[in-house]
Image (tube, rainbow, N blue to C red):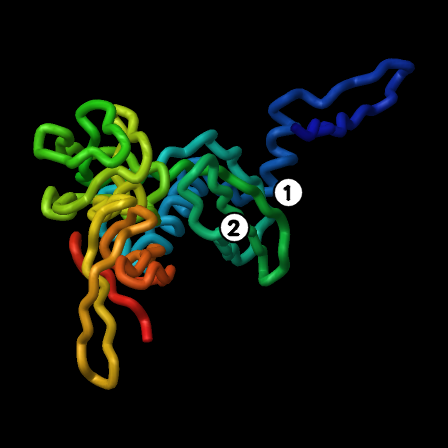
Amino acid sequence: MKRILTVILCMLWGGCFFLWPPEAQANLLQQRYPQTVSQEYLANLGREKIKQALTETGEKRRYELQLVRQPRALQLPAGQLICEVELPRGLEFQGQMPVLIKAYVNDKFYRQITIYYRIGIYDKVLVAQHDLQLERALTTADFKVEERCLENPAADYLHDAKELQDRVPIRFIKSGSILTRDMLTTPIVVQSGAPVKLLTNVNGVEVVTDGIAMQRGRLGTYIRVRNARTGKMLRGKIRDANTVEIAG
């Protein structure tokens, strides 16, 4: 924090120094800087700027703004005062977000200060009731709905139990974790070594033959398969638990 050097006017009179009393110093400062921008006003400028930015992004979830530290009041000279407020790094939801306030007197830049806020975005989301294991089918007993402060409001959080239908964890999920879409995937429907039907389209005609899956996979993914009759290795897309579609 910068030190404020107060210039003390002294008068040499009769070999003694006389210091101006505090009241005189205060009066001198008041004459030089008659305008005061209060702490509350500065904090409100920052708060309103953040609210405006959230509205412009279409944010409709509940949020809380926390002022990290109260700013100091500004002492300014006489003249027309204009305050410009900026978010130099835009909206930030992790850590402290700076808000820059620039003060102009008679259209001339005079001083700027930076204040810091924390933004908390809240929403009702699905939360793991207990540890969820990899590839395990989910039930309603595995989660609950809670209003939580979101660590990353831009993440694709899950809100409805319907979004868990035909989904399994793609990784271990710790109890109390908020569920996001990228934590889940479709279940494995074809196991390595399982017999499958190989479907090929030849001149508009579907041809089906027997095959063996050489890899496990999920709906819509590609796996290697072997033609059971010719032994030829092929690559195809899983259409369902029993069918792999061979391209070409």
Binning the other alpha carbons within 10 Å of mark 1 as few (below 14), some (14 to 19) or many (20 upward) gives few
SS for callout 1: helix
Is residue 35 in sight in this rendering? Answer: yes
Residue 5 vs residue 124, the one in the foreground: 124
Checking the image for residue 7, the label placed there is: none
Q: Is residue 214 above or below residue 132?
A: below
The residue lying furthest to the top in this view is 16
- 59 left or right of 22 in image: left
The residue where tag 1 is placed is 32
User: Looking at the rendering, in which quadrant would you find the N terminus?
Assistant: top right
* Residue 197 image-quadrant placement: bottom left
Q: Residue at x 60, y 42 (%)?
A: 33
Residue 111 vs residue 247, the one in the foreground: 247
| Amino acid on which the number 2 mark rests in the picture | Arg
* Residue 30 image-quadrant placement: top right
The residue lying furthest to the right in this view is 15
Q: Residue at x 67, y 20 (%)?
A: 21
Q: Earlier in the sequence, mark 2 or mark 1?
A: 1
Q: Position of residue 170 (x, y in %)?
A: 30, 39
**How far, Cα to Cα, is label 2 from label 1?**
35 Å
Q: Position of residue 82 (x, y in %)?
A: 50, 57
Disc 2 or disc 1, which is closer to the eye? 2
SS for callout 2: loop
Is residue 220 in sight in this rendering? Answer: no
Q: Residue at x 78, y 18 (%)?
A: 18
Q: Position of residue 163 (x, y in %)?
A: 15, 47
The residue where tag 2 is placed is 89
- 29 left or right of 197 in image: right
- 237 left or right of 17 in image: left
